[in-house]
Amino acid sequence: MAIKLGVNMEFVRHHDKPFAWGVAKAAEIGYEYIEPMVHIGRELLSEAGYFHSVSMFDDPLWVRNLCAQHNIKLSGLSSHTPLCKPEISVEYLKMAIRWAADAGAPVVNTDEGPKPTWTTKEMDFLLMTYTLTEASMVAERHGIKIGLEPHQQYSKTPAGLDAIYNLVDSPAIGINYDTGNSYLAGGSDPYEWLENVRDRLVHLHAKDISLQQGEAERGKVTGTPVGCACGEGVVDWQRVIDIVRPVAQERDIIFSVECGTVPEAIRSFEHLSRLI
């Protein structure tokens, strides 16, 4: 059991390349894992080969076989969907869980998403309970973990993320901690927060935040799509590793790097590899 390195496929988003190109590039850099983003239906950019997202209408065994060709594995799926909107999230999450099981991804990552404009907090938590109950029943049957991420209005604090986590008592539900989102939210110490969720950790988004972004946005936003190269921002990666290492003696913990370009992915891999 160990801390291992992966990369979210967002690292090829600005290069206008398809998913298969990104898989090969991640393996070339040296990553052991990737985290695809999945969607329902069909859309122009990924069908034309200009975008990295994968349709869940595609055969998950195609993704499994493609990864095997490059000796790389799936750490999880980026399957974010608004838990407060069950008309969207229930069927999406259940499909993502089944697709993950076939593709070989042990985790599906999500958050509460943007809330409806007309609902109260009490209504939102009832809606999330419904969504997570439905999703967790499928996840338990398929042996998949649901990674709840701090990203939106309720999960921007430790207490808020815990409140969502505690809505449904299921062994399938865990935490996908995001080092960048927790820092930008600004309401708590991100290292103490990580210590609080460490025993429930099923996946980790390794996202660094540049000094400039931190100064401009900390306390004003609840998250960000990608960060800068790991080691070039505000996150103390040695401290993060030291916090996670005890649970990595019991199970693999994948640090899935979230950055915006191939050069950033290379520098992130080099920096984190030296520390790990």
Image: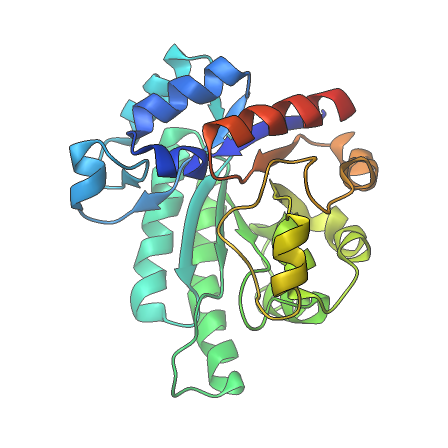
Camera-side residue: 112 or 259?
259
Task: Determine which quarter of the picture holds residue 165.
Answer: bottom right
In this view, 59 is above or below 126: above
* Residue shown at 48% from the left, 23% from the top: 73
Q: Point out residue 12 in the picture as x, y percentages from the top left corner.
A: 39, 33
* Residue shown at 83% from the left, 40% from the top: 239
* Residue shown at 42% from the left, 19% from the top: 25
In this view, 114 is above or below 244: below
Camera-side residue: 52 or 118?
52
Residue 178 visible in image: no
What is the total number of numbered labels drawn onto the structure image? Answer: 0
User: Could you tell me which quadrant the N terminus lies in?
Assistant: top right
Task: Determine which quarter of the picture holds residue 192.
Answer: bottom right
Task: Determine which quarter of the picture holds residue 66.
Answer: top left
Residue 84 visible in image: yes
Q: Point out residue 226 in the picture as x, y percentages from the top left corner.
A: 51, 46
Camera-side residue: 136 or 237?
237
Q: Point out residue 33 in the picture as x, y percentages from the top left corner.
A: 52, 26
Give the side of residue 170 with respect to residue 55, left or right. Answer: right
Give the side of residue 56 with respect to residue 223, left or right. Answer: left
Image colouring: rainbow
In this view, 142 is above or below 17: below
Q: Point out residue 105 in the picture as x, y percentages from the top left corner.
A: 46, 34
User: Could you tell me which quadrant the C terminus lies in?
Assistant: top right
Camera-side residue: 251 or 240?
240
